[in-house]
Image (cartoon, rainbow, N blue to C red):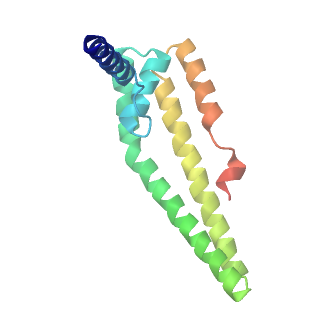
């Protein structure tokens, strides 16, 4: 009886070890980092080493600009939250300040879209027509509508 239980326990332990090892090895790369996103692009679009190197170079070059725009958008979001808080607490609206905020938000959103568009176009320059078509479809599927950028 002891041998049977030992065999079952050992079999269960080996089976669980193999199961978790298999899934850890086949887990997709995280896409919350630039390297993870680029690895996903490489796999999804079946990029060659030369294409991948050029696309990585383009993304790294545009990174600081896109991060600066993202910081501006985050600052504008915080400014909007402060504006809303002030509006709720004082029950007054500074229309000139709000108009300035809206204009600045439109400008930064436009800059963001232009920078993203330039990045996508630069990446597609090294792709084959099939890869380009697939990439454009994927990018178009995740790009937020312009109306969401003005919120």
For residue 89, what is the image quadrant?
bottom right
Q: Is residue 124 left or right of residue 18?
A: right
Q: How many labels sit on residues?
A: 0
Q: Does 80 sit above or below residue 27?
A: below
- In the rendered image, residue 139, in percent from the top left (x then y), is placed at 59, 31
Q: Measured from the top left, where is residue 8 in percent x and y? A: 33, 14
What residue is shown at x 69% (from left), y 81% (from top)?
87
Within the image, what quadrant is residue 144 found in?
top right
Q: In front here: 31 or 146?
A: 31
Give above or below for 114 relative to 27.
Answer: below
At horizontal 47% and vertical 28% (from top left) the residue drawn is: 123
Q: Determine whether 35 is above or below 46 in the image.
A: below
- Quadrant for the C terminus in the image: bottom right
Query: Residue 68 at x, y = what percent?
Result: 43, 55
- Residue lying farthest bottom? 90
Position of the N terminus by quadrant? top left
Q: Residue furthest front?
A: 1
Depth check, front residue: 17 or 110: 17
Q: Residue, x 36% and y 33% (percent of image)?
A: 35
Residue 29 appears left or right of 140:
left
- Picture residue at 72% right of the left edge, 82% below the top: 93
Residue 135 in the image, given as x and y percentages of width and height = 56, 24
């Amino acid at each position: 009886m002891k041998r049977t239980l030992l065999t079952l326990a050992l079999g269960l332990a080996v089976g669980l070890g193999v199961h978790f090892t298999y899934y850890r090895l086949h887990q997709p790369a995280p896409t919350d980092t630039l390297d993870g996103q680029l690895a996903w692009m490489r796999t999804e679009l079946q990029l060659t080493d030369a294409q991948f190197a050029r696309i990585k170079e383009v993304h790294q070059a545009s990174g600081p600009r896109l991060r600066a725009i993202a910081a501006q958008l985050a600052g504008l979001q915080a400014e909007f939250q402060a504006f809303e808080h002030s509006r709720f607490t004082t029950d007054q609206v500074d229309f000139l300040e709000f108009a300035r905020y809206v204009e600045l938000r439109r400008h930064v959103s436009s800059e963001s879209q232009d920078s993203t568009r330039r990045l996508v176009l630069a990446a597609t320059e090294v792709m084959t027509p099939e890869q380009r078509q697939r990439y454009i479809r994927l990018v178009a599927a995740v790009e937020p509508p312009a109306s969401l950028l003005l919120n």
